[in-house]
Amino acid sequence: MSILNVEHLTHGFGDRAIFNDVSFRLLKGEHIGLVGANGEGKSTFMSIVTGKMMPDEGKVEWAKNVNVGYLDQHAVLEAGMTIQDALKSAFDPLLQKEERMNEICDMLGTADEKEMEILMEELGMIQDELTLHDFYTIDAKVEEVARALGLLDLGLDRDVTDLSGGQRTKVLLGKLLLEKPDILLLDEPTNYLDEEHIAWLKRYLLDYENAFILISHDIPFLNEVVNIIYHMENQELNRYVGDYDHFQEVYAVKKAQLEAAYRRQQQEINELKDFVARNKARVSTRNMAMSRQKKLDKMDLIELAAEKPKPEFNFRYGRTPGKMLFETKKLVIGYDEPLSKPLDFYMERGQKIALIGTNGIGKTTLLKVLGMLDKPEKGTVFYKGKDTKEIYGTELAKIRRTELSFIFQDFCLMDSLSIKDNILLPRILDEAEIEESKKICENLTKKFNINKLLNKKPYELSGGEKQRVAICRALINNPQIILADEPTGNLDSNSSEVVMRTLESINGEMGKTILLVTHDPMIASFCKRIIFLKDGQVIENLKRADNKEMFYQEILKRMKNL
């Protein structure tokens, strides 16, 4: 059921347009993140849907009897109220009913039989409603929320005029959460909360049965509590199903597809214009030239959004100290339930390591945690000395795009793109030079014998062919680190040999770091260090000696004990 409908919304300030023919809908139970750069109109949108601001065009329709709660960044509290008064005001409708109940009790002493019957019926209805809404636990609820937001430490009898701006915001947030409206509208609710209180709010929103719209620049928080993203950019509002990370991935692909389509169209336009210019004056070719001119005139032109100027800062960077790339401290991995005991793991630059263990013990999950695709259950992961919890947003996207490369069992290819575009995608996103990218793609695909498949779509390929495509894509951007999950799992022996020789070459000659998961002892023998996992913990580190065959036999021997 639709709670809110916004249709054909257009709004601006002077000659600056904010929205142009924007539509939006909110369904019951949806947890929406409203994202976009500063100045794109997120808070303006909130003001319009709450009726604080009238749009230039369009309509905003709320469902009947919907209770809306809005946390405004700039809202204020009335002077003279205590923190407790402000929080309890969330229950004003119930408190008013209590007053009416007391009035009825006073009236019963003088009422005749008929009046008493009417009053008793009303009294019973009020009593039932108060009980239904847990009226008699109000004080406990107020105390619970106050404690969770750190307001109890300030004293509930403290006047709101004595509070800082951040403390006032906490009070407003507490009041809003106590109201439990049908829809929450939250504008930067974590701005004034510390880690403990943010964790509580996260749990609250995850358990929140009703709908909410959240504006936040706190990406980790946003990621964990929303299931739908609405993105504001260039006067448009677009819907994406999933969390913020998924939105970024889809958005990047859409942008790359649009840019590729734009380049193809520009090339076509140039070719048509050139043909017209060369042939319009000749009688024999004039009709063909006019035909192409008509095609030009009817063409729907693809437009790219103008790049907004970005501030530029020039800092001098020192060399990254030490050789350490990955280091974990008491790392526990898993999904809801731990898959491992606390792991202490390290990986240095230039190493080539294989992870071996039985299915279901968390090898793939460990790869994803190290690659910052998943979060650990407990413990800490350091990447180049920095806690990965502190890496997010554009910094994280850049690391994944330019420093890390992934080869997964499920290939992660885009069915809407050709094989060529799938391989080139990391370089397109990195805005690399086109001709150079094409040459690298040509060399890689020849090496893996898929150069004749470049114009096909992924669904037209076999599993082995898809695997080779995924490997080419992983190598196209010359990454520092390759994280590979069974990179040869869908390949024949010849292709497997090519893959491993290639990985061995880029490790030895180019100094690239490789961490791979495998069940194949022969593949593992190409590595210089083997980590064996059993029962959720590292049971052995095996280092390669000079003799590869002996190393292979050692791996086989230890695999029998897993």
Image (cartoon, rainbow, N blue to C red):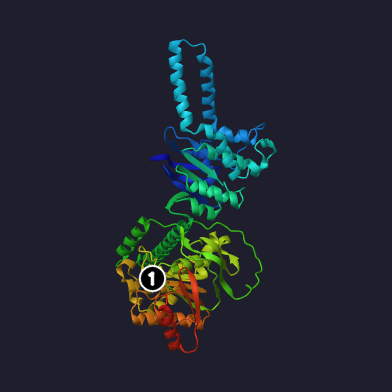
Q: Specify the quadrant that holds the C terminus.
A: bottom left
| Whether residue 230 is situated above or below residue 553 in the rendered picture | above
Is residue 457 visible in the rendered image? The answer is no
Instruction: Return the residue at label 1.
Output: 420
- Classify residue 262 as left or right of residue 306: left
- Pick the residue in front: 336 or 59: 336
Image coords of residue 470 (percent x, y): 40, 71
Residue 33 or 449: which is nearer the viewer? Answer: 33
Q: Residue at x 42, y 39 (%)?
A: 3
Image quadrant occupied by the N terminus: top left
**x, y percentage for residue 456?**
32, 69
Image position, residue 360 (x, y; %): 41, 67
In this view, which residue lies farthest toward the right? Answer: 162
> Which residue is farthest front?
561
Amino acid type for the residue under numbered disc 1: Lys
Identify the residue shown where x is 45% and y is 35%: 66
482 and 485: which is toward the camera: 485
Q: Residues within 10 Å of mark 1 (few under 14, many from 20)?
A: many
Would you place residue 545 above or below residue 95 in this image?
A: below
Quadrant position of residue 27: top left
- Helix, strand or loop at mark 1: helix
Q: Nearer the viewer, residue 378 or 482?
A: 378
User: In the displayed structure, would residue 102 be above or below residue 280?
Assistant: above
Residue 472 visible: yes
| Number of numbered markers | 1
